[in-house]
Image (tube, coloured by chain):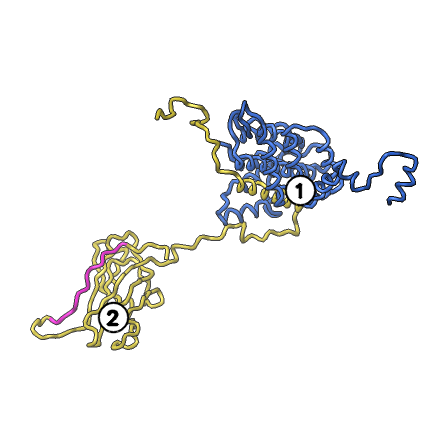
Chain colours: A yellow, B blue
Amino acid sequence: MTERPLHCTIKTPVLITLSDLKSEFHSGCRMIDISLSNVINPEVGEIHFKNSYTAYITVKAKCRLPDSKDGSEVKWRTCVRRFRLMPNPNVEAGSQDYFVLSRKQMQFDLVNVSALRIILQQPSPVWKEFKIEDLKVFRSSDSIKPNPLPSWLTDTPDKSNRKKIEGVANLESLSSTLQQLWALSEEVSAQQTNRALGRYEVDGSYEINLLSYT
Amino acid sequence: MTERSKKINSSDDIPKESDRQFLEKSNVGALMRDALSKIIANRPEDPISFLADYFDSIEESSSQVQKADQILKLTHYSRPMFESNVRMAYDALAGHRVSKGVHGVDGNVFVELLQALCRDLPEPVTQKLLQKMECRPYEAIHYDVFRSGVFTSCVLLDYVKLAELLFQSLDIQQSGKANKSLCDVVVEQLNTSLGSTRTDARRILESGYNLGVDGLYLALERAMSRTSRNASLQTCDQFVTEICDCFLSKVKKFG
């Protein structure tokens, strides 16, 4: 991945509990808030992270409407619905894997996003602590194309209707002679010595004042 | 054999010498041995003329520079024997007397040798080469520097021959002059190819394309469409001088 992740503020995960603090209820549900308000053109293509004992992941997004002048927020929409990270929440499998949530897992295109909420769920009583690490949000890769091949590599010129150039008898022999000249020059360039003649010269002139007195 | 000599010299009183004694006396045996070993080592393409040149060089009393020049001309620089020949040439010049009690290869003999090697090249080319490989007369020339200079000169000789061949192919009317714009395009293509760095694979591929048939055709066609009907002409020497500039750009100046 040569792209850099979007600069977003990722808040610390919050364990969701019932308001009644007396009962020991472990909800097995954490939430991470991501704010994309600093991003100029917020659109999300991929979300990368490393799992650490999370069983399911849900992504909700709050999109800014382009024509809303007063900035009124729209309600949260579910983008990724309960994506399974661990096949069996009680067992180790998938607990330490690296994941990428791409457009395929998303219900709709994430454009004009103002905030994201990532909800982690772990129903198993075996894993009390669970989280995701190295959370990175990327733009969709359509905007960044790989370097196209140069035209001379992909061009297949039409040789059949090639007119003869006036003054050039044999293009092939000209080309091969030129390539030999090229090879000779490169050979010489490779064999040049680095040994200095031991001149006390500065910029081609012999400057006595620059010689050391010691 | 002794019988035959008896018959021929039957009337003489000169003691009859065997063939072996004759060879030893005239030192021809050693001479032939040297000649054969040189042939085997240098593997010339034309052994007869090689032998002729070899015997010529022994006969005339030549200076150290001339001797060194002859040694260097024995074989092509691509052969492994060339290294030994350069060593021999260096040793031959090392006897040069710089001043009282001081012997060695100094700038004087080095420049003389380079001039001898390049005597068949056009004058401007030799001048430019010597500018790059200029050594002050009093400077001591190390073997590495000597080898580099000699090697460059030998490659340049090949280069100039190829360049002349190239000119012949551009000079279709055999008039001694070729279309200048065509020549310029050719030199330009070579220059851009040489300008790319050696380790950059993409640039090397691009250079190969530029000098290949397709790239050349495109460049030449562009040039021909731009110039008018009566384009200026260029002689062989001018063309060779220009194209040698490409070569010389790759030669490092001694420092």
Total labels drawn: 2
Which corner quadrant of the image does residue A174 belong to? top right
Q: Where does residue B210 sit, x and y in percent of width and height?
A: 57, 45
Residue B192 visible to an observer of this rendering: no
Residue A54 disc label: 2
Query: Mark 1 to mark 2: distance in Å?
Result: 71 Å
Residue A19, numbered label:
none
Q: Nearer the viewer, residue A158 or A15?
A: A15
Q: Mark 2 Cα within 10 Å, few/some/many (few <14, many 20+)? A: many
Q: Which mark's residue is nearer the viewer, 1 or 2?
A: 2
Q: Secondary structure at mark 2?
A: loop
Nearer to the camera, A144 or B245: B245
Residue at (62% x, 29% y) in the render: B115
**First to last magenta residue range:** A7-18
Tell me the subunit letter for badge 2: A
Residue denoted by label 1: A165
Sooner in the amino-acid sequence: mark 1 or mark 2? 2
**A64 up-or-down from A98: above or below:** above
Would residue A184 be visible to someone looking at this image? yes
Label 1: how many Cα within 10 Å (few below 14, some 14–19, many 20+): some
Give the chain letter at badge 1: A
Residue A11 inside the magenta-drawn segment: yes
> In the image, A124: left or right of B69?
left
Queried whether the magenta region covers residue A50, the answer comes back as no
Image height of B185 relative to B206, above or below: above
Residue pictured at 50% horizontal, 32% vertical: B254
Q: Is residue A135 above or below residue B11?
A: below
Relative depth, front residue between B103 and A198? B103
Q: Position of residue B73 (x, y in %)?
A: 66, 37
Instruction: Give the amino acid type for the residue marked by disc 2 in the picture.
Output: Thr
Which picture quadrant has residue B90?
A: top right
